[in-house]
Structure formats: C-alpha cells, structure tokens
Image (spheres, rainbow, N blue to C red):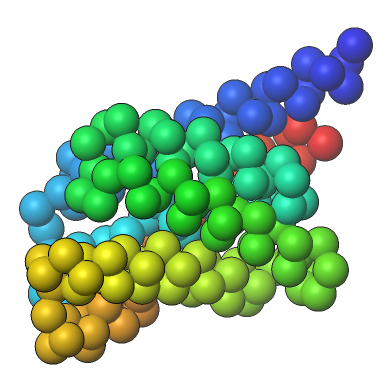
Amino acid sequence: MREKYQNALMWALYTVLFLFAVIVQTVIFGHARFLDVKLAILPVTIACVAMFNGAENSALFGLGCGIFWCFAGADGGAIFIPLFCVAAAVVGYLCDRLLVRSLVSALLVSLLALFICQFVLYLFKLWLGAAYFRDLFLLFKQLIVSLIACPPIYLAAWAIRKAGA
C-alpha cells in the first residue's frame, strides 16, 4: 500500500510541476521576449519528467499534458496532444536505453523535446500561412533560449522522483 501511495504522490507532484510551468510560461513570461523569442517551458518540463519514468508512463503523462494545454487555449491547439505524447515517449525511451540520467542528458533531451514540439508547430504554421521561412532563425533562437529553464526543472523532477521512489 505504501508503494501505491508514493506512486500517486509522485504523479500528483509531477502534475503540480507541470501546472507551475504552465503558470510561469503563460502568466510570468506570457508577454516577455528574450532575444525576440518567447520561452517554451512546457516541452522542457515534459522532457525532464520523462527522463525518470520510462516511455510508457511518460507518454501517458505527455498525453494528459497535451490535452490540458489544448483545452487551455494554447496557440497551435490540438497539435500539442500528439506532440507532447511523442516527445515524452521518445525521451523516456532514450533515457531508458541510451542515456544516463544527469543534467547534461536533461539538456540534450530537453533540446530534443523542444525541437519535436516547436519545429512541428512551425511547420504547421508554415502550412497554414501563419509563419514565414525567415522565422526559422527565430525558432532556433527559441530552442536555445528555452534551455535556460532546464536546470531548475530537472532538479525539481529529480527531487519528485526521489520522493516517489
């Protein structure tokens, strides 16, 4: 029974971490721009959570986060449901099979999750005519600038995993 309680506590704390990241991204940094780009904290959060939980559990977490983010009225809408799910599954699989769970790995998988989510969103907007080819440079700047959020989110996800293990 104690193991089920710890597992439920761990996922509840991961959910609180995601909700905190939503608040930080939308309220605190909602209009702020750094080097002409907005921070994308949510893919980093999903990647840091996925590092510690494997592909299957992380994909379900990413699916839930994508549904929440879609219903929250995100720019891009429903495209984030499969993107968060795929990004979490890929990161969870890579960390299970290839990578050591460390801060350097967190930076790499966060960059991968950012690339998956933001590049597909850019291609979708390009297809709709809401973006231009010249915005590709801004996309790469956004990927690099968004990595600023990785160390504190990684430490929070690591602490939550230790509490739930």
Q: Is residue 131 left or right of residue 117?
A: left
At which x and y percent is residue 102? 70, 68
Drawn side of residue 145 relative to residue 157, left or right = left
Q: Position of residue 11 (x, y in %)?
A: 64, 29
Asked if one can make out residue 91 in the rendered structure from this viewpoint, the answer is yes
Determine the image quadrant of residue 23.
top left
Query: Closest to the observer: 135 or 27?
Result: 135
* Residue 109 quadrant: bottom right
Q: Residue at x 55, y 44 (%)?
A: 62
Q: Quadrant of residue 81?
A: top left
Residue 147, visible in the rendered structure: no
- The front one of 23 and 72 is 72
Q: Position of residue 139 (x, y in %)?
A: 26, 78
27 up-or-down from 94: above or below: above
Examine the rendered structure and indicate whether residue 100 appears above or below residue 153: below
Q: Please tell me which residue lies in front, 13 or 96.
A: 96
**Which residue sits at x=51%, y=34%?**
64
Please tell me which residue is depicted at 15% across the width and 49% down the height of the picture: 30
**Residue at position x 41%, y 63% in the image:** 117
Total labels drawn: 0
Q: Left of 8 or right of it: where is 45?
A: left
